[in-house]
Image (tube, grey):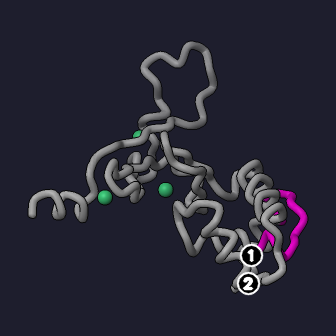
Amino acid sequence: MSDDPDYRLLLRGAKLRITQPRLSVMSAVSDNPHAETETIIRAARELTPDVSHQTVYDALNALTAAGLIRRIQPNGSLARYETRVGDNHHHVVCRSCGVIADVDCAVGDAPCLTASDDQGFVIDEAEVIYWGLCPDCIEVRST
Ligand SMILES: [Zn+2]
Ligand SMILES: [Zn+2]
Ligand SMILES: [Zn+2]
């Protein structure tokens, strides 16, 4: 899994040096969408047992800067990462338990990027976070 050839291609395409920690972090983020750094470190260590916290942080930063992973940080939450990039999808966060789910902007389209008045900016991301209660928490409250 950690030497998945797809990740090598992605890294090469982004002109990043291919290292075992980077491959492990890509795989860990892919397997744990919207996970916090601690979870990613644990998953990366299953693939590369001796990888340090700092190395994982560095890999997350490099992969985020290269656009291979996306960092999201809802208010009051730690940074979370995902490999689903490039589609400007949004997130819905449960106020009660903090669980996060993906919400499509629109299939094959990102209408939120078309601001009614862009003020002359070139816009490449619309950060929209929906807040509410997840199905599990609604169930708990209604019983
Ligand atoms: Zn919930
Ligand atoms: Zn997402
Ligand atoms: Zn949208």
Name the amino acid type tagged 2. Answer: Leu
Q: For the view shown, which residue lies furthest in the left direction?
A: 143
Instruction: Kindly identify the residue that appears in the image at 65 percent across and 61 percent down.
Output: 37
**Residue 101 visible somewhere in the drawing:** no
The C terminus is located in which quarter? bottom left
**Looking at the image, which is closer to me, 31 or 113?**
31
Disc 2 packing (10 Å; few <14; some 14–19; many ≥20)? some
Coordinates of residue 41 in the picture (x, y in percent):
69, 70
Instruction: Kindly identify the residue that appears in the image at 48 percent across and 40 percent down.
Output: 75
Q: For the view shown, which residue lies furthest in the right direction?
A: 17
In the drawing, what numbered circle is on residue 47? 2
Determine whether 84 is above or below 127 in the image.
below
- The image quadrant of residue 30 is bottom right
**Looking at the image, which is closer to me, 102 or 123?**
102
> Which residue position is annotated with label 1?
24
Name the amino acid type tagged 1. Answer: Ser
29 within the magenta span? no
**Residues tagged 2 and 1 counted as in contact (Cβ below 8 A):** yes
Give the magenta-colored segment's residue range. 12-23
17 within the magenta span? yes
Coordinates of residue 59 in the picture (x, y in percent):
79, 61
Q: Is residue 11 left or right of residue 76?
A: right
